Image: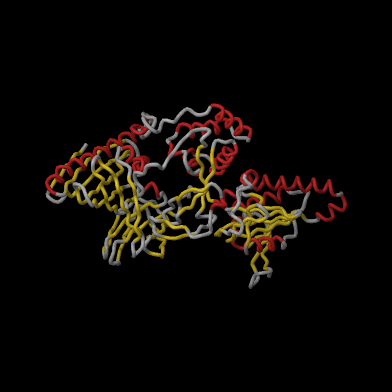
Amino acid sequence: MRRLYRYNAAVIRAEKTLLFSIPREALWELLSDTERLNRELKLPSVVFTFTPRPEGGSSLRGQATFGPITLRYVEEPYRWVKPSLWWVQRFPENGPVSVYRVGVQLETEGAGTRLTAWSEAEPRGVAGRFLAQRIVQSSVNGLLRACTSFVAFLEGRQVTPYPIHAHSSLTPRAPDGVAMQRTRARLEQAGFTGEQVARLIAFLLLSPPEDVVDFRPYALADRWRLDRTEVLKLCLQAVRAGALELHWRLLCPACRGAGPSVETLDALTPDKAHCASCNISFGPAFDQDVEVCFSVAPALRKAEAGVSTYCIGGPHRMRHVVMQWQVLANTSETLATSLPSGTYRLRSPQISETQELGLVQNAPVVLENTASYPVLFRLENLGWREDAATAAQVTALSEFRKHFGSEVLAPGQELVVRQVTILFTDLKGSTQMYATHGDAPSYATVRTHFEQLSKILEAHGGGIVKTIGDSVMAAFTDPERAVQAALTIQREAAPLIVKLGLCSGPALAVTANGQLDYFGQTVNLASRIQGQSHGCDIVLPDELRRFVPDALPRERFTAMLKGTDAPLILWRIGG
């Protein structure tokens, strides 16, 4: 261990370094969660307020009580480079110091990590000098104590990374045994394995309160290393079983911060939402800015979260941001990185334009600010898997439409869906079938066909939006899976002959005839493209052709469809 305390008239600094056997990426995941870290260090909760800046973005102010002192301060944005370092600077308006900084640096050391924790303070007066020494030493010691606990957890020597808080509010009350048994029975009846059910119940009963209130199903699936759609379906069924409650909330497109949740879709409004942190207005777009989240039901466990806040600016709140750095006016900074090769997006809440950067592994990043004020830069990982299950993804699922049909938008409300793939099918020769075989047998055949379609669509992440006579309209958020579903339908449709067409693009999500529906040019084109099908084939536009296996026969043709200004390039697959 290396220890260094350095003092002078202007700045008092403490710094310590420890070696850990844990890879720095694993340690970063816990150390970057500054909300829980500050709580574990027994720091007081903070009341935060945002003040918009004329040049864009917001100024963050905090207020916290330390013993007899209520400290008020301005906090600069956290600076971080994932998974190498983070630090933050605060300017107290009262109290013993005028400037306070704290940070960590993580360096790879063999298979482990060399971690340096440091803190600095600029004191006010003689008394401030004495207290500043205690503040910086306490900060560094607390950080290393927390890291030691994190390592013990990661090595399996400790059941929680947060032992201090675990002895108090993290211990849940005894659950309702009847509710728990009812939940287990209903989930197993829905087709989930005993292991899946046991895992969900253990998560709901034993996790910290903040983990089971407004949690994201995709993030839970990633943590469990399970299929995202399966965990989402498990959560939906748990709502029906009374173990979970379903909520909806808005997401800022820049920081991906979540706003307050609402109980039902009809509580959403088409009005622009506002992110106080980024000081921008947005959406809401049904497929990007609205997400589903779940909370444990009070019948199973009483859990509350969000009553106290300890930090809102740390790296863990913006997992897609691999670098955040504030550069002073008319200044440039070069930052060393350990980022893998790839394409990243550079943006700023103070600048409307974004820029995509192609970086090679470990390449330094140069940030230049030519403005007369500090500018906050964010470098985003375009390959990051979004862990928010959007409203468009959820409402496209057959399970949702089957069991949550009452979840609709308010009458007359329209929300933009920036990208959806619409699939239309139609039975060829159905009129002749009814005339030849009669209404009852023919209807039974069509009903069986619809059931088969529903299973295929569900298996590929889509769902039936509505049926129109012998036709089906379905929606997908993933165009590739939509094409695969279409291919499966044609493989398994025999002896029936199915005409099938697809189109992908923007649409409007609305409520029609008491159910969620889609309207717009993409829907109209999908229907008209399906009209170009001869049966036993698939017709799709040129932009979807890349999802078709090369071995399948195809024919390129053009067609002038109603509502278009020029002929469309279409492809006929199979047939």
Marks counted in the figure total: 0
Q: Residue at x 59, y 49 (%)?
A: 395
Position of the N terminus, as image quadrant, is top left
Farthest front residue in view: 68
Residue 467 horizontal side relative to residue 62, left or right: right
Q: Is residue 460 visible?
A: no
Q: Nearer the viewer, residue 278 or 464?
A: 278
- Residue 548, horizontal then vertical, whole percent: 62, 55
- Residue 197, horizontal then vertical, whole percent: 55, 32
State how the image is colored: secondary structure
Q: Residue at x 59, y 60 (%)?
A: 508
- Residue 551, horizontal then vertical, whole percent: 64, 54
Q: Residue at x 69, y 69 (%)?
A: 562
Residue 298 horizontal side relative to residue 50, left or right: right
Residue 416 horizontal side relative to residue 32, left or right: right
| Quadrant in which residue 170 is drawn | top left
Residue 104 horizontal side relative to residue 570, left or right: left
Q: Residue at x 27, y 46 (%)?
A: 103
Position of the C terminus, as image quadrant, is bottom right
| Quadrant in which residue 67 is drawn | top left
- Residue 221, horizontal then vertical, whole percent: 50, 41
Q: Is residue 349 visible?
A: yes
Q: Nearer the viewer, residue 553 or 215?
A: 215
Q: Nearer the viewer, residue 287 or 106?
A: 287
**Relative to 316, residue 479 above or below:** below
